Each structure stands twice: as structure tokens, then as C-alpha cells.
């Protein structure tokens, strides 16, 4: 508040490269919203040196041909390191497991979404996927609410597979996950910064089409319950889901928010507010995702953050192609000033220095 | 087949009094179909000396007033011993547990049924019920299919409550229960004789309205899977659900079959066919339900069965008020000839000798 105080307390801290296990890069299929190039530039600008790309592209990543396509596109274009998820479908229950080592993990969509990968209500298909996923490999990541979450966690427990719950957003889900953890279940979860900072009270300000997101923004009580249970939340993940502003203003606005360039500043603001310690934030944005997804440390990699820079989130992210953000106008404190990835300066003071193709697939032999 | 052989091999065996943990006695509310008197007469004629009465009556058994009403009606009319279930509703999550010792158990309806007790899809209500049910008391019995079954079993596991799955009928449910048992879960289950002996191929013969039952008759594969997993099935329970023949022939036939007078003969026929041993049948119709529902042994109680009597199931049960059976015309082998309950001959050669009111509530001090 006192400008002198602000200046004198200004503090640069060095953190490890952040990991975002949940991004939608829209490539292949909707590169007017984002692609491997723009999305990974957006990641670096947000302090992320590794992203996990979701499989609900067009075509969806669900078999050998589409997995190879994603590998080819990412290898040519990615500016930061990355993993690729294999999607679970009705048709690949016996083959998805073949990708257990090469993929970042398997993604299961148990709810109706706009994605081409809904598994709907068939418990037999869910069970086949969980049974057939190889043990002691990468996690099975689920988009599941309410009773579907309870059902899929039972299957994970039955067959002793590591389960990871994406974007926990409501009291009912965090209650279940917390109590499963207390009972000893091998389950982890992530929460997005938007579910930690926005609730249904913000819909009017953001706009009704713009505020469409899955899972939906919760109530104040939902948001409070996430903070109350923050110790049971393993990761912060953006669920970066870019759509153009025009699409968000259309009659059928697709659900999703961009998040790569705003997530760390929003979370650093929470650190500043005393809601979470910087140590815990680093656990949730680096240490835990590295361990849970079995990723080797990136050598000579770190980011520098100005903890005390106060700024207002602008109308558009700098690098994401989507051209809007639900956080427009929010005042935040903390900004990425520098990113060094595998010995190379890849981002400094707003400029991306990594070329497309510099990023490595975390499951490739080059990375290992 | 040779009448002389039949005569010479004729064999009377003495078995313990059978326990049917799942009957609908329609009292209060629909006594034209059945009541505590006719239903318990039907039980004795079928070899059952204890029945568990489901709470989806009218009014439903869900609070102090309705539980007392069921106690009063049963005390005046029951001819065999019995327990009374408390129903879980939206409104009694904090009070249902008060009946944990006085009830036979709690019944949760997770599917849409014709009952007044559906809990629909609200995982919070399910969770509150499981959390609030006292530990180390009677089981929580669930009517749940597919993913709802998986979800409720997770909740039972989370809060370490004994769960009992009613009328398992399809491959998908027995697969889940078997694998949960293998993993060490405290779960038990029952299967009805109709799901062990009828499948969708029988619908034409039985009639489409008459064959309405919940869960529905499965496929041949479903029926086969129940027999394949018979070692994981703790109990045979009739799910005796009488409706009048007129109702079953109406435009909106209510789902449900009578079962009390036909279940033992159908199962003895399976013994005769070598599908199950008599020892295992006694476990599933007496020993296991007694242990799982915490019922003390009935002194001086037994039934006598003619193992070799062959007969054809008639158009109507002798004692149930419903006046029809889906098993009409089936040839069976094995018949109850005598029932002795607490030292008194209560059934012999087709005649009921117990008066209404002779039956005791298994949770009452008189019984204990
Ligand atoms: Zn999702
Ligand atoms: Zn929810
Ligand atoms: Zn997502
Ligand atoms: Zn590290
Ligand atoms: Zn039922
Ligand atoms: Zn089923
Ligand atoms: Zn029933
Ligand atoms: Zn016994």
C-alpha cells in the first residue's frame, strides 16, 4: 500500500520449473484457439517448464496413429517440455494400456463433456480400462463428479491402480478424496486456480457464456472447502482450456478458461495473503507432480519470480491464442521474470527465447 | 422317472429354520396384496422361520412413528419370527442411525423404483447416511446397480461400515462384489432364486407385464455369471414382492415376484441337479444370514424337507395373497413337509398351525 514499502520489500525468488499436468493445447484440430507452439509459449510465460497435454483434440489421442501424430506435432513445435496423455474410449479398453510408459498417463472422461472422449455411464467399460491399465506405471486421471468419482475410485482401489482426480471443484468431491486418503487409498488430486479464486458470485462480472467451465464454478462454500482441505490437494493444475473470445460470446459458448499465464500470479497472491506458504505452493506446482507422474528432474532448470510486483491482469494473455481471460482486471502480486530450461534462458521479462522444437517429451529417450 | 425308484429314494432331511432377509409384506398400505399374517404364513410354508421386512410400505418405515406402527402390526399378526428394516430417505440422514440396534438393518434405495424411498443421485445424502450409521451394528443394505453400486461400496469402505448388496442380478455387479471381496472389503450379498433360474428368454413365457421385476431379469450370460460366482454369494433371499395378478396384467404392471413358497423348492432342484450342495445351500439360507445380520439361534427350531418329492408349481401360491407366480408350471424336486419353530409345530403337510402373533421380533427382548 505504501509505495516505498513495496519497493523496498521487492524480492526476487528462484523456484524450480513448474509442472502443469493438465492443459488443452487444441492441436491437432483447433489451432485457431491454441497449438503446441502458442500453448507452450504461454506455459513458459507462466513459469511452467513441463505441461501435460490432454487427449481431447480432433482427432482425439486414442490409438497408435493419433498418438504418433501428437508426438510429431509436439516435437516440431513445443517450446517447453511436455507429456502426452492417452484418452480412454469405448473402443480402446484392451489397447490404451500399451501407452502406459510412453504417455504421461491415461485420461478418462466420465462426464458428458464437449470432448470426443466421453465414457458415459458404462461401469463395465470403466472397469475394463482400470483392470487393463498396467500396474506400477503412470496414473489414471479422471474427470468425474459426485457418484461417478466415488465409483471410479472404488475401481482404482479394487485393482490397486494409482488414481489421480482432475480439477476437484466442489465440497462433495474433496470430502470424498480427503476421507479416502485418510483411509489409506492411493489417490491424488489437483485443483485449478480458477476454482480456488472464483465462484458463482463471479459469473455476473465475467459474463454468463464466458464463465462456462467444466466442472462449473462452485459456490462460496465449495471454494471455502477447497481451501480448508488444501493439505489434501496434491497439485495445482491450470486446466488451461482456451477458446476464442468470439466463441465464448456465441450462443453455445464452449466451456473452459485459459490459465497458463495467470495461475502462478494468482497463487502467489494467495501466498501474499497468507492462504498458503510458498513452500507448499512449490510442492503443489513442482515436487508433487514430478513424483506422482514419475518425471525425472530437468537439469539446470529454474524460474525467477518477483514476489512483490503488483499488476492488473490485462484483457488478453500475452501468448495464448485465445485472446481473453476470466481474470481480466484482477489485481495480483507476483510475476515471472525469468525462466531457464535445461541451461538455456527461455523467457525473460516478457520475451520468449525458446524456439519451437526446443521442448522435449518427458517420456522420450532424449529426455531420459 | 421310474416311480419305484422315486419311492425308494425318497428321503426326508432335517434343516435349520431358513432365514429370508428380503421380503416385502405390503403392510401397512397394500394389504390386498399381502400382510404380516399372509406373508408370514407364506414364509412358513416355504420353510422360512425368520423374515426381514423391507421398509417401502405405505407409509414407509423411516421414523419413530412408522417404525412403531410396523412393530405393532407385526407383533399382532406375524406367524414366524421377523426383523424390520429402517428406510433411508432424504430427510432422515441424522436419525436413521437411531434404529441401528432395533432394526434388522438400514435399507437404501439408490435406483428409481416404485418405492417411496428413492435416494436418487445425491452422493452427499448417501455419504451422510453411511457416515452416520453406527459402527459395529447391523448392515447397510443397498439396492444399487452398476456405477451406483461401485459408489456406495466406496462409501462403505471409507467409513468402515458393513455393506450388504441386495438381489445381485447381473454380471457387472457380481464382478465388482467378487473383486471387492478378493481385495478384503467387508461386503456381503444376496441373490434371489428368480435371478438364478430365470432370464430374458423366459419373458415371453411368463408374459411381459408379469415378468417386470427390479432388478430386471438378466441375460443368459448374467445368470451364468451368478452361478460361476456362487462361492462369493453369501445368501439366497427371495425378494418376495407380491402384487395381485390383476395388477401384473394392468397397463402399468408393478415390478416384483412372489417368492417365499417357491424359493426353497427351486434351490433344492438346483441341489438335485448338482449345481450347489445342500451344505452350501444351508449356509446361504441359514448360517450366513444369521451371522451377518447378528441373529441369535432360534431354540428347538428346524424344518423337514422331502428331498425327492417331485411336483409342479401351481398357478397360485397357497398362502401369499398375490394369487400368481412366475414359476407356474415348472417342475421342481424337494418340498417342505414340516416346520418346528421354538418347540412348536407351526407347519405340517400344507397346513399352517402357528397363530398370528406367534412370531417374535428378532431384536426384541422376548426373542433375546
Ligand atoms: Zn476435465
Ligand atoms: Zn461436484
Ligand atoms: Zn481439462
Ligand atoms: Zn524438483
Ligand atoms: Zn430392491
Ligand atoms: Zn446391473
Ligand atoms: Zn426388494
Ligand atoms: Zn444355525
Image (cartoon, coloured by chain):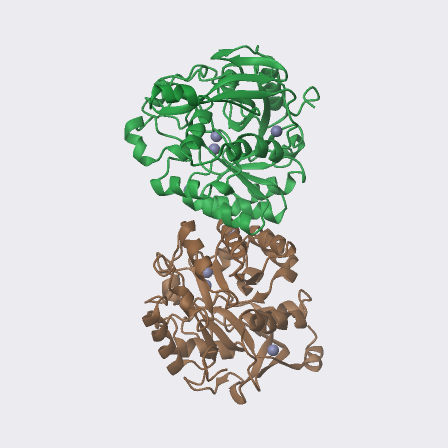
Chain colours: A brown, B green
Where in the figure is residue B283, as x and y percent of width and height?
Answer: 55, 34
On screen, residue B185 above or below A279:
above
The residue closer to the viewer here, B356 or B115, is B356
- Horizontal arrangement in the rendering, residue A322 relative to residue A15 (left or right): left
| Tally of marks | 0
On screen, residue B17 above or below A222:
above
Quarter of the picture containing the N terminus of chain B is top left
- Horizontal arrangement in the rendering, residue A206 relative to residue A234 (left or right): left
On screen, residue A186 above or below A268:
above
- Horizontal arrangement in the rendering, residue B316 relative to residue B163 (left or right): left
On screen, residue B152 above or below A155:
above
Quarter of the picture containing the C terminus of chain B is top right
Whether residue A211 is visible to the viewer of this picture, yes or no, is no
For the view shown, which residue lies furthest in the bottom direction? A344
The residue closer to the viewer here, A334 or B153, is B153
Whether residue A185 is visible to the viewer of this picture, yes or no, is yes
Where in the figure is residue A163, as x and y percent of width and height?
Answer: 53, 60
Where in the figure is residue B338, as x and y percent of width and height?
Answer: 52, 16
Where in the figure is residue B181, as x and y percent of width and height?
Answer: 55, 47
Say which quarter of the image contains residue A67: bottom left
The residue closer to the viewer here, B28 or A312, is B28
Residue drawn at point x = 37 percent, y = 68 percent: A61
Amino acid at each position: 500500500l505504501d509505495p516505498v514499502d513495496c519497493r523496498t520489500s521487492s524480492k526476487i525468488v528462484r523456484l524450480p520449473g513448474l509442472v502443469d499436468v493438465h492443459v488443452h493445447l487444441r492441436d491437432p484440430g483447433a489451432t485457431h484457439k491454441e497449438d503446441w507452439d502458442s500453448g507452450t509459449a504461454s506455459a513458459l510465460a507462466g513459469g511452467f517448464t513441463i505441461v501435460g497435454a490432454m487427449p481431447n483434440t480432433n482427432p482425439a489421442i486414442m490409438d497408435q496413429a493419433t498418438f504418433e501424430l501428437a508426438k510429431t506435432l509436439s516435437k516440431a513445435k513445443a517450446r517447453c517440455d511436455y507429456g502426452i496423455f492417452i484418452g480412454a474410449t469405448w473402443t480402446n479398453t484392451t489397447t490404451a494400456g500399451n501407452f502406459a510408459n510412453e504417455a504421461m498417463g491415461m485420461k478418462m472422461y466420465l462426464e458428458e463433456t464437449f470432448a470426443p472422449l466421453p465414457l458415459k455411464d458404462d461401469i463395465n467399460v470403466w472397469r475394463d480400462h482400470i483392470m487393463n491399465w498396467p500396474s506400477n506405471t503412470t496414473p489414471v486421471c479422471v474427470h468425474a463428479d459426485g457418484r461417478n468419482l466415488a465409483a471410479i475410485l472404488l475401481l482404482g482401489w479394487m485393482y490397486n491402480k494409482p488414481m489421480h482426480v482432475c480439477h476437484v471443484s466442489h465440497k462433495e468431491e474433496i470430502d470424498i478424496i480427503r476421507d479416502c486418503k485418510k483411509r489409506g487409498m492411493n489417490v491424488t488430486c489437483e485443483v485449478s486456480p480458477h476454482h480456488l479464486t472464483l465462484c458463482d458470485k463471479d459469473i455476473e462480472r465475467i459474463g454468463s457464456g464466458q464463465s462456462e467451465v467444466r466442472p462449473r464454478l462452485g459456490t462460496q462454500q465449495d471454494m471455502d472447502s477447497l481451501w480448508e482441505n488444501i493439505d489434501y490437494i496434491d497439485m495445482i493444475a491450470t486446466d488451461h482450456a482456451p477458446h476464442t473470445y468470439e466463441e465464448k460470446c456465441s450462443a453455445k459458448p464452449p466451456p473452459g478458461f485459459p490459465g497458463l499465464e495467470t495461475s502462478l500470479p494468482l497463487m502467489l497472491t494467495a501466498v501474499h495473503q497468507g492462504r498458503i506458504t510458498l513452500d507448499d505452493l512449490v510442492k503443489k506446482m513442482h515436487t508433487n507432480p514430478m513424483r506422482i507422474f514419475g518425471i525425472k528432474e530437468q537439469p539446470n532448470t529454474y524460474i525467477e519470480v518477483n514476489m512483490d510486483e503488483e499488476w492488473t491482469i490485462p484483457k488478453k494473455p500475452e501468448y495464448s491464442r485465445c485472446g481473453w481471460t476470466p481474470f481480466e482486471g484482477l489485481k495480483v502480486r507476483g510475476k515471472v521474470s525469468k525462466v531457464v530450461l535445461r541451461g538455456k534462458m527461455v523467457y525473460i521479462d516478457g520475451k520468449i527465447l525458446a524456439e519451437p522444437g526446443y521442448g522435449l517429451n518427458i517420456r522420450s529417450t532424449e529426455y531420459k
